[in-house]
Image (cartoon, rainbow, N blue to C red):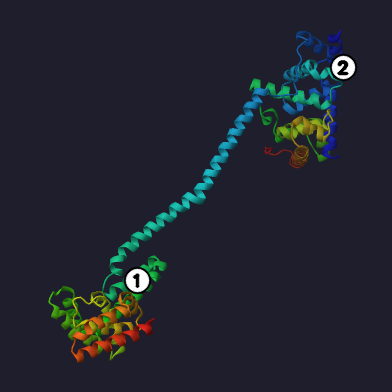
Amino acid sequence: MEAESRNLKAETLYERHHREVYQYIVRAFGFERSVVDDLTLEVFVRLWQSARLDSGPIPRSYVYIVARNTCFQYRRNSSRGKRNSDLTISLDELASYADISSHAALTEDVFALGQLLERLPDREREVITLVDGAAGLTIEEAAGVMAISRRSARHLRDKGLRRLEEWAQQVTRFGGLEQHAD
Amino acid sequence: MPIEDSLRKMLRHSADNSSPPDVERFRQRMREHPGDAVHDYAVNESRGWTFFKMVAFGMAAASAAIVAISLFWFVTVTYPAGIESQRELARAQRIGALLPALSNESPQSRSLALVLAQQVDPVFAAETAARLQQWEASQSQAQVAANRIQRYSTRIFEGLQKLQWSRDPSDREIAIWQDLLPVLKEAQRDRDDFINVAIEYRKVLPLLRVNEATPFRESYWGELWIYNILLGSKINPVVQIARQTAPPISVVQQVLREHGDQLPAEKRQAFQEAVQAYENTLKTVQ
């Protein structure tokens, strides 16, 4: 009876958060799709096994802490921590694929913006994904998930947004630039 | 549209269009796991690992502190002390080479050595120059004094020899009446001569026998006159020594009473005059 109740709670939790967690893992860690599928399921299995499930509703930030730890553990175990730049295309290619004619067009181009986001350093990309992504966490919650101070989280997000803005302008103006993301 | 809004829109849109595993796959995954295992997955690290990390961090911090303290000690104490001692050694070596020239009798050599010493160590050179000046002054003073007592020195020396070494009773009388007392009286004519001679007479005072009169010699009141003159000389070191060895007036009067009657009238009177003068001098000195 108790097991059924736990299963039900876990399924409810899964229904509520699986899309945003999936999105978080894709954006923040850049794993392959099959891995992301597996990790998303693993996160909720862990939540299902978690003692917190019995002590009332699980906070959203807790879900992300578990997701983050799961991803880091996977990265450690698999030793396949690919750098962000390996997974992304160059700004030159981006400009040619996107056929960009204006800044406004680029910022509304989902594909191009996604590529720029992938070029950001890990921590900047992660905080932006947590705050501006489907998770919609506050800065405080994102800082709690990433185990950093609120000030650092805000600084990282502002820095990431500035970079994105800058790159968007460069790509728009020249239709392609050499890579200098880092 | 600001990039922030575009980004938010893009991420939401992307989330909506993503295709995560459906709930059925999640149920399947749950069935594959044993349902009774309960963990806290929010804790990323085991306690053992955390403890190990804390110990390692503590040891690293302690090592860093020790290194920093050692470095600070070396920079502030050991290294400057080493440098200072090396400097001191080099200075001592250079000064050491100049020492023979500095103690040379030739003033030219000394001046040259002083100039060189000034290049090596100005403080040492200044101090040495002052000392050398003092030494030269005392040397010249000694030279002047030696010149002054030159004409008395033979008689003083002869008198001293007789008092010190001769066993002949008449030699003592000759030493007092012909050498030492006449020299002292003669020197009294010139104050500068007298000072130098009186200083020289510090050697004579211990050889005089005025505290006892056995056997009685006619040199007794001559020795008393020497005491008279030296006690009244007002030359501090001489007066000091004379006061320490001078007999009390009662002793001298006793000698006069015992032996005065045996002397001829002329000599007795001279003895009495000497005792009287001695008494007056003692009163003045005291």
Towards the viewer: A125 or B18: A125
Q: Give the side of residue A11 with respect to residue B87, left or right.
A: right
Q: Residue at x 40, y 71 (%)?
A: B126
Q: Quadrant of residue B280?
A: bottom left
Towards the viewer: B95 or A125: B95
Q: Is residue B115 above or below residue B146?
A: above
Q: Quadrant of residue B285?
A: bottom left
Residue at mark 2: chain: A
Q: Residue at x 72, y 38 (%)?
A: A176
Q: CA distance from mark 1 to mark 2?
A: 102 Å
Q: Give the side of residue A78 with respect to residue A175, left or right.
A: left
Q: Is residue B100 visible?
A: yes
Towards the viewer: B246 or B85: B246
Q: Give the side of residue A35 with respect to residue B136, left or right.
A: right
Q: Look at the numbered disc 2 and give the secondary structure of its residue.
A: helix
Q: Give the side of residue B191 with respect to residue A48, left or right.
A: left
* Disc 2: which residue: A12
Q: Looking at the picture, how far across and down is residue A44, in whole percent?
A: 79, 18
* Disc 1: which residue: B114
